[in-house]
Amino acid sequence: MPRPESTRVVVVANQKGGVGKTTSTVNIAAALAQLGQRVLVLDLDPQGNASTALGAAHSRGVPSTYDALVDGTPLAEIAVATEDLANLWVVPATIDLAGAEIELVSVVARENRLAKALAAHPAIGSAEAAGEERLDYVFIDCPPSLGLLTLNALVASAEVLIPIQAEYYALEGLGQLLETIEMVKAHLNPRLVVSTILITMYDARTRLAAGVADEVREHFADQVLKTTIPRSVRVSEAPSYGQTVMTYDPASPGALSYLEAAREFARQVSA
Ligand code: ADP
Ligand code: MG
């Protein structure tokens, strides 16, 4: 698989909880790493679910995204290699991050903290600038809110990936997310685009799921990946082993779908 011309920085956002943000972040990241890409996951949710899924320690005090945002510690110093896969690194999140929104209130340009941290990372950027060590993808896993943490991620990224769970209320609340993205585009980060919609926890046996998927495709057309992620027990089991489903059970339907979704995602040329 060819490497992108410069690092693709992707925010995985949806203020609704439980739609598959974290699961999609870690598994697409792992799939791309398996395909030979160099990938960094930034955990921006104080719950640290992405850190858990990637087997990274994230108890209070562990160097984390909190240190990058609040103290300006370089991300490259905080990132840890995953045991699972070569080419896959994670910047963990600890519960300390829950306080960051409040601690940053009085800081000037507080919505720019993560963008600054990424801009200072020596392995992020074009092939010429960053050399052999260059990262191909950075995925930022967001908390289920549109607060200052998600705002930092939207300002720091070029692309938004929105996971949508194939269920009845799927599109509710999406308007608010899209409005926030428009606001960020207009005032803080003009290059931001919604590049990818991923339908998760799809149950092909129900008419409801098919209906929701059709509706999502009507709204977003080309941005929706053809690959949908099925509901699969193996996907939900993997994190308790500190693994992604890509290594926990590579032949399972969930792993195969995430691999296909990752391939499709990599083929997209970002605007
Ligand atoms: P979010 O990060 O948006 O809150 P998660 O990725 O944590 O959502 O997913 C919510 C729950 O659904 C988790 O328990 C996760 O294991 C489970 N889950 C996510 N995707 C799947 C799937 N394809 N099949 C089965 N369970 C899933
Ligand atoms: Mg999550």
Image (cartoon, rainbow, N blue to C red):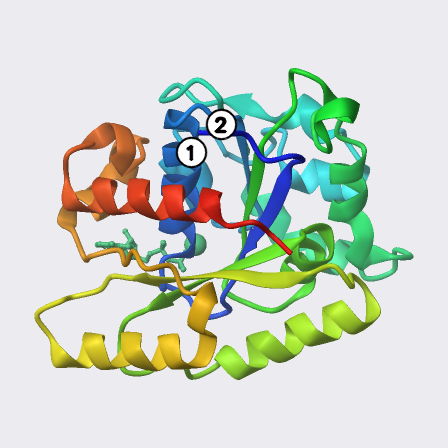
Look at the picture and state if 152 lies above or below 6. below
How many neighbours does mark 2 have within 10 angstroms: few (below 14), some (14-19), or many (20 or more)? many
**Residue drawn where x is 30% and y is 39% of the image:** 239
Label 2, label 1: how many angstroms apart (C-alpha)? 5 Å
Q: Which mark is residue 58?
A: none
Disc 2 residue type (three-letter): Gln
Report whether the residue tagged 2 is closer than 8 Å to ligand 1.
Answer: no
**Residue drawn where x is 61% and y is 32% of the image:** 61
Q: Is residue 48 visible?
A: no
Residue at the farthest right position: 108
* Ligand 1 image position (quadrant): bottom left
Look at the picture and state if 49 lies above or below 149. above
**Local secondary structure at mark 2:** loop
Coordinates of residue 72 in the picture (x, y in percent): 80, 36
Q: Which residue is mark 1?
A: 32
Quadrant in which the C terminus is drawn: bottom right
Q: Looking at the image, which is closer to me, 148 or 260?
A: 260
- Find residue 134 and report its image quarter: top right
Coordinates of residue 139 in the picture (x, y in percent): 54, 43
Q: Is residue 127 left or right of residue 269?
A: right
How many neighbours does mark 1 have within 10 angstroms: few (below 14), some (14-19), or many (20 or more)? many
**Residue drawn where x is 17% and y is 43% of the image:** 234
Look at the picture and state if 38 lies above or below 146. above
Q: Which residue is mark 2?
A: 37
Disc 1 residue type (three-letter): Leu
So how many labels did they put on this image? 2
- Whether tag 2 and tag 1 are in contact, CB under 8 A, the answer is yes
Quadrant in which the N terminus is drawn: top left
- Find residue 231 and report its image quarter: bottom left
Coordinates of residue 209 in the picture (x, y in percent): 21, 75
